[in-house]
Amino acid sequence: MLETQNLTLAYDKATIIAGLGLTIPMGKITALVGPNGCGKSTLLRGLARLLSPRGGSVLLDGHDIHRLPTRQLAKQLGILPQGPVAPEGLSVRELVAQGRYPHQSWFQQWQTDDETAVTTALEITGMAALADRPVDALSGGQRQRAWIAMTLAQQTSIILLDEPTTFLDLSHQIEVLQLLERLSRDEGRTIVMVVHDLNHATRHAQHVVALRDGNVFASGDPREVVTPRLLRDVFGVEADVLPDPRTGLPLCLPYGLHVS
Amino acid sequence: MTQQPWFTVRARRVPVSFRVDKRVVPVLAIVLLATVILMTLNIGVGEYPIAPLDVLKTVFGLPTGNTDHSFIVNTLRLPRMLVAALVGLALGISGTIMQGITRNSLADPGIIGVSAGASFVAVTLIVVVKDVPSGVLPLAAFAGAALVALLIYMLAWRKGDSPIRLLLVGIGIASIAGALTTLMITFGDINDVQRALIWLTGSVYGRSWEELLPLLPWIAIFVPLALLLARDLNALNLGEDVANGLGSRVVMKRGVLLFAAVALAGSSVAAAGTIGFVGLIAPHLARRLVGPLHEGALPVAGMLGAFIVVASDLVGRTILAPIELPCGLITAVVGAPFFIALLIQSRNR
């Protein structure tokens, strides 16, 4: 169970998140949505202990993650930051092998478990055939899948992703989102992702958290959370929300700016 | 089971397992062999030429039928060669660490001014204190190198990791340290200045056991330390956030690695002055040969560094013989165009 209690996050003097309480449901995909500057990426960094809280805490199974040894936490929670860059010439397999870092020690650097975890991660992400290619020679979608494979090799029950589909073209976006769905559905992993596209959130996440000005405006099942009022109050746009003819999930069609 | 690109070593009884890229062992063996051959040739050439076989015999204490050989090889020329190889090793590893933690393939202890800081403090010591014991010089050089590293860290690194900012600030600090060193030389006593100047050119000329011995503890501590931290360097090389997410104690590991890089650069400057560009070229060639993972790239870059300095010294000694060019001049002639080519390449990307 991952939750925040009265969490306050700040950069220097600018407070981004103030006194936030949030519970992330286990085994589901949670999407953090909101306009630019609402604090969704900051919140994700806080959840991943990349940013120390100014106040309050992030609890994993009741333990403050900032008090846990970072290696121990890295066996339970993985984070894929936005737009990571692999060193030139690093192969996919070598990148994925880096995910084993928290499981290794000075004397145990490559056990059978490590080999198995890498092979499995490559297979799940469909990267096995590309394993010996350099990461910098891949397409955007393949590259993102290689990084996701690295976090999978870490074998954590929770995976946090910051805008995993940004800068990808449409088919690569779907490629990555479907992979995340499979991870959640087939492996029961808890996934928390920051997404820009509200329709991606409604279609691929079972839990949506909408943030405004550093606080939770609404959270829950996308069918209940995503409404014309949410689009107006959180994103400042007027929109129709229709049931998706294929899935019945809410589909947002913005048609104008909201003037207050 | 697919063909793995790495060798895996797993002991049955003891809980030990390692993995290394398949390319590393042959590449290391070839570069080591080439370096030893060049060292042997280099010891052989000079005013009193000695055949390579006699050089090897003398080094291993076997009789060659000429009693002069022992003095010429073991007292005069061997320590110089060992200094050249160890300085190259230190520079290659120092450069690899710096490029790894800054994620900047243009970082090099010479270019970003770490060596210049080391030179400045060491020259100041030579000129002001005069008879400096040779064991103190590495400490002084280390202090100077550490000072510059700290300055660069505060001025350029923490405000985002723009590679060009790091370079510009480093080059700026290098020129300031260079100017201060010149000032020291201008005011110094002529005899001290002469000593400082020979040393500043970046040369292993006239290096004896007296310069070699103080270098040994630095190599013996910081080279193994760097190799032990290879995995952490891999994690840091993926970026601070990814390294944090993998459970690396980023600030601590980066601090220790930077400390090792600075110690190696500083002690190499204390032994042979500023030999530029070795820390830039060696890591690039190493990554080209064995890939960017540091379990392989670190030792290969170290070995290549040794090769480069030994080869530069051989070229410097023979190309205009009997005039000797300092090996730092040779590395600069090769290294500067290499640096410019990398700069152009990185701009086009």
Image (cartoon, grey):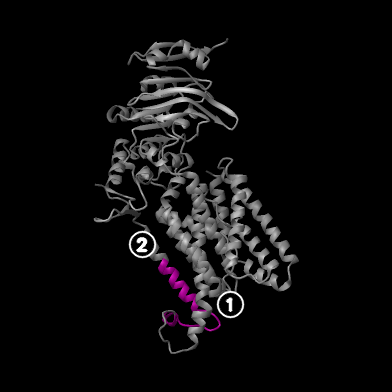
Q: Which mark is residue B255?
A: none
Disc 2 target residue: B26
Q: Is residue B288 above or below residue B165?
A: below
* Left or right placement of residue B308 versus residue B167 in this view: left
Residue of label 1? B321
**Where is residue B172 shown, x and y percent of the image?**
66, 51
Position of B254 with respect to B231 (left or right) is: right
Q: Is residue B267 above or below residue B231?
A: below
**Residue at horizontal 66 percent and vertical 72 percent from the top:** B131
Q: How many marks?
A: 2
Q: How many angstroms separate mark 1 from mark 2 (CA)?
A: 35 Å
Q: Secondary structure at mark 2?
A: helix
Identify which amino acid the numbered label 2 is placed on: Pro
Please report the residue visible at 72 percent of the width from the left and 63 percent of the height from the top: B184
* Quarter occupied by residue B272: bottom right
Callout 1: residue from which chain?
Answer: B
| Mark nearer the N terminus (1 vs 2) | 2
Magenta region, main secondary structure: helix
**Magenta segment:** B32-58
Using the image as rendered, state which of residue B179 and residue A49 is in the foreground: A49
**Residue B31 on the magenta span:** no
Q: Quadrant of residue B137?
A: bottom right
* Amino acid at circle 1: Ala
Of residue A203 and residue B186, the one placed in the foreground of this image is: B186
